[in-house]
Amino acid sequence: MIADAFGAFLPGPPVEIAGAAGGPLAGLTFAVKDLYDVAGQVTGYGNPDWARTHPPAAGHATVVRQLLDAGADLRGKTKTVELAYGMTGENVWYGTPVNPAAPDRFPGGSSCGSAVAVAAGLVDLAMGSDTAGSVRIPASYCGVYGIRPTWGAVSLVGACPLAPSYDTAGWFAARASVLRRAGEVLLPPGPEAALGPLLKVQEAWVNALPATAAALAPALSAAERVLGPALAVKVAPEGLDAFYEAYRCSMAEEAWTTLGPWITATEPRLGPGVAERFALARAMDPAKAAAGRAFRRVAQARLQSLLAGGAVLVYPTSPIPAPRLGIGLPEQNAVRERTIGVTAIAGLAGLCEVTLPAGRAEGAPVGLSLTAAPGRDRALLALAERVAEALGLPV
């Protein structure tokens, strides 16, 4: 049994399963966010009423089975924000995990427990999910590697949905090589052609706090040593606020379509922030959601065309380090809006994005993102390993 002083895992007896005797991940351990099915276990989805109204899983989620078949050993299920609809990592029912890299700050959500389990050295890798930033942001906040893969590239069979046209199965690791090795198991074959040039997304760098941008300057230089001098580009002429609004409206409509029937029938208890977000989703104006979907098509065409030849975007994963514990909902919402304007770059276009633990600002970790065209996940993971080595990070 793992000694979990950081509260990364669900309360109660640990869920442990030995992996296959041999395989590419033999000797590694992993954990899974509590929205992935593990045979014989109730998938709680971060909410006691969800757990109460759902039976134990009949089988493993596809990604759980893939990792076990590759030889990795399951060490437990990790906490998640309720119904995966939150960015701070808070859970009033099961407890908020402690950020090992900055204990006075939030761990980030909704894949909070998985990020903490890796950051605390409890497992080698951990599965999360990323809809609006739920792998990338906790990875940045906790100082670990994380990937949001190309939309649809990694199976979500056996995973609880939030907004299916945005949901992705991502993962965390403390070492770039382990992040890549997991990708070799979970990802389909993809283009192995060299990536480049490097494109510096001006809007995202301006959106970041000056301390964040300064902390990431050495990492940007490391990426330039690998791919050559970065070319400055603007990808959001409408502004990042427009990216946020399109994402918010189209995703909220989807979230209510997906989970609204259960919420209406069950009337579950929902914690602060989560309840408000679902209330707003329920009341979403269909015209605003339709406008968000139309904007998404424009952004998708623009970004996929820009990256089709192998170019890589580079920008701060999060504009700020993890917020301090105890800030109110208005401050949390302001951080959310500023952050999702950036995470929506990959989210709207279905791009693959890797975040590296590249610096510290205000005494807390901040991540640098490398983002590539759909289907270039394997090449991007290999590039991230090279950049990490150039920066002197663990590989």
Image: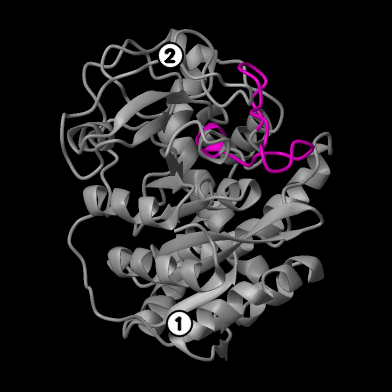
Q: How crowded is the residue under tag 1: few (<14 C-alpha within 10 Å), some, or many (20+)?
A: some
Q: Which numbered disc, 2 or 1, marks the residue closer to the eye? A: 1
Residue 370 visible to an observer of this rendering: yes
Residue 254 is drawn in which quadrant?
Answer: top left
Q: How crowded is the residue under tag 2: few (<14 C-alpha within 10 Å), some, or many (20+)?
A: some
**Apparent side of residue 233 relative to residue 61 in the rendered image (left or right):** right
Give the residue at x 55% y 18%. Answer: 3
Question: Can you tell which mark lies on residue 57?
Answer: none
What span is in magenta? 90-115
Q: Residue tagged by mark 1?
A: 226
Q: Residue tagged by mark 2?
A: 14
Give the residue at x 59% y 72%. Answer: 315
User: Real-space Cα distance between discs 2 and 1?
Assistant: 42 Å
Residue 326, image x, y percentages: 83, 34
Element on which disc 2 rests: loop
Magenta segment's dominant SS is: loop
Is 187 placed above or below 169 here? Answer: below
**Apparent side of residue 171 relative to residue 193 in the rendered image (left or right):** right
Give the residue at x 48% y 39%. Answer: 255
Callout 1 amino acid = Val
Quadrant for the C terminus in the image: bottom left
**Residue 260 painted magenta:** no
Is 263 placed above or below 320 here? Answer: above
Nearer to the camera, 387 or 147: 387
Residue 170, image x, y percentages: 40, 47
